Amino acid sequence: MYGDESVHSYIHYIINTTRKHNKDNISRTKAYLSFYLENPEIKWAFLASMVSRNAGWNMTDLHLQPFKKMLGEEERNQLFMTYERANWLIFSDAFPQLLVYKLSKELKTPLFHLLKKFHVSVFMENQWKLFWKKREQDKLMTALIINEQNVIQGPVVKQAYFQYHVFNRLPYMMQNFLRMNAVLFPTKSNHLYGAYVQGFTNVSKRIALGVRLANILYSPNVYDKSLNFAITQEHTGSRKDFEPFLSLHYPYSPMLRGLYPVIKHQDNIRKDWWKTGGFRNRWWGQPKQISLEDMKTAYYRKRDMLFAYYYIKNAISPAGD
């Protein structure tokens, strides 16, 4: 069927391709979308591309004046590294899986045993084998959501540096309390869909959010419009990618590659979360009824409050005083 030489060439291809696209948020987001357009049965890839867009917008937000006024440079750098590390780590785990599937599809034979070479959880190796046989697209999407949220739990969420400098600090706790953070699915119309992020440090809540977001994105009212936006609107990391479609005119939002260098990450060998942390059956549970309410008004009311706070504070205590 295939010899050692072929296996080595596959592994080499997967490592190099993943490394090529894992340089920054822009390259990751584009790689997910490109893969989805070629393999639309892997629904998680489109979800990942849209969530990754949001990570980029969160990164560039840190250079807006309200954030610069409220947070010191060190705090903003720590928040950036939280987004960047999670974004990088998920891609480094997920994209080899996508490429193994792509090779399997091209060769018409399953190669999922190769996932061990990339330290992918046994959980996902089993799920890919099931998908190859049963083609249950939604189940695979949920499995990937479960897996990737567990992948970042130890190295990011529970990691001592991020715990101390980010998750136990007032800016994160206030953002969580006030529901200032959201995953948004823009369209090229006056509508904005998505869901708020709360309890990010809780893996079960992140999984539930991921499933809820998947159901929103793939609902008939949202899918075509969001896909059209993704295909036709270049991802720059700036919220100017979508705010003009909402007739919103906020202060200039910079593009990501003008702000941040390529970060060199340490690729520590990961422990298999499925073996060390266990699995909770409720993660497979059916989500509650989702809301497709337009988020534009509610979300940007919070943004208005943020900018108003900045302008008031700046008037009382101007920069440089």
Image (cartoon, rainbow, N blue to C red):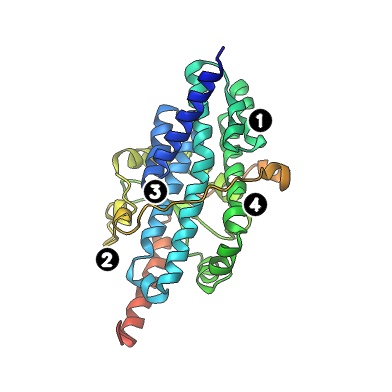
Give the image location of residue 205, x and y in percent: 62, 54
Between marks 3 and 4 in the image, the one whose residue lies nearer the viewer: 3
Give the image location of residue 178, x and y in percent: 51, 69
Q: Which residue is mark 2?
A: 251
**Type of amino acid at the residue the image marks with label 4:** Ser
Judged from this view, the residue extending furthest toward the top is 1
Q: Which residue is mark 3?
A: 24
Q: Which residue is mark 1?
A: 126
Q: Which residue is mark 4?
A: 204
The mark nearer the N terminus, 1 or 3, is: 3
Instruction: Report, in whole angstroms, how far the alpha carbon at label 2 lies from the one at label 1.
Output: 48 Å
Between marks 3 and 2 in the image, the one whose residue lies nearer the viewer: 3
Instruction: Report, in whole angstroms, how far the alpha carbon at label 2 lies from the one at label 4.
Output: 36 Å
Contact, mark 2 vs mark 4 (Cβ under 8 Å): no
**Type of amino acid at the residue the image marks with label 1:** Asn
The mark nearer the N terminus, 3 or 2, is: 3
